Every structure is written in C-alpha cells, then in structure tokens.
Image (cartoon, rainbow, N blue to C red):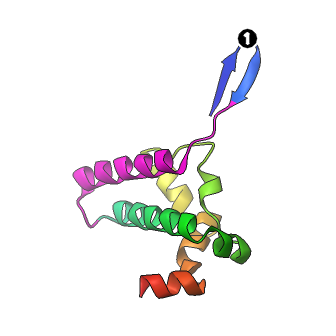
Amino acid sequence: MWKTTNRKQLLIMYTLDIVIKSFKTITKQYEKLKGVDCIEAHYYRIIVRDLLLEHKYSEQVENAGKPIYHYFKYQLPVFDNDYFLFLYNVYNPVRFAVETFDSIEEIRKELS
C-alpha cells in the first residue's frame, strides 16, 4: 500500500498480526456468505495456520524456500473472488508453500 505525502511515496509494512486479523475477517465474511465449509474460508484458515507456523519456525521455512508472510506484508488480503482465485491458482507461490509446508520436518511433526 502506498501513501502519498508531500510528493513522497511511503511504503507501509503490515505486521504479522494485522495480516492474520485481515485473513480472519475475510474468512468470517466467506463463512457468513457461503457457509463454514466453503473452500475460500477453508483455504484462508490454512493460510493463517501456516503464517503462525512460519513465524514459529521462521529459519526452517526460510531454508526450505517456503515463506509466505512476505507476500502479504506490503499488501493486505482483500475480500474478493478474483483475489481468492489468484491465491488459489496452482502456479501461485503461496499455494505451493501451503501445499508443501508439511515437507518441513518440524512443521510435519506439529501438524501430526
């Protein structure tokens, strides 16, 4: 997100907490609109879980090349079907990381 002040552009970095709150808000919106079991809400719950795991095991996630937080720290997720389809696309690096997060041993142990 860019903010303009006195002809200077300022880049705003969002904390992990803000990113997670945004995903949780969007998840609730999808649950209200489509039901608790809809694919959008389910996928966003997984992303929240993986953001928390990435924070806990940041070194292991970075070494495995599967960080996801950096995709959201400068632009918050939005409640929009096109945005969901973008994140859910099989070629999106967030989806790749989400689908393969359990290949990191520490995360696999925690998830089992």
89 lies above or below 70: below
The reply, left or right, for residue 65 in relation to residue 53 is right
Q: Residue furthest top?
A: 6
**Where is the N terminus found, in terms of image quarters?**
top right
67 in relation to 19, above or below: below
| In-front residue for pair 12/89 | 12
Q: Residue at x 73, y 75 (%)?
A: 63
Q: Secondary structure at mark 1?
A: loop
**In the displayed structure, does residue 35 sit left or right of residue 42?**
left
Q: Quadrant of residue 49?
A: bottom left
Residue 26 lies within the magenta run: yes
* Disc 1 target residue: 6
Q: Position of residue 5 (x, y in %)?
A: 69, 15
- Can you see residue 82? no
- Foreground of the two, 4 or 81: 4
Q: Is residue 59 visible to the viewer in this orientation of the structure?
A: yes
Question: The C terminus is located in which quarter?
Answer: bottom left
Location of residue 21 in the rendering, given as x and y in whole percent from the top left corner: 41, 48
Q: Residues within 10 Å of mark 1 (few under 14, many from 20)?
A: few
Residue 11: image x %, image y %?
Answer: 69, 33
Please report the bounds of the magenta region as a residue range: 11-37
At a point 45% along the width and 82% down the height, the residue shown is 110
**Residue 45, how many percent across, how many down?**
39, 63
Q: Is residue 28 above or below residue 45?
A: above
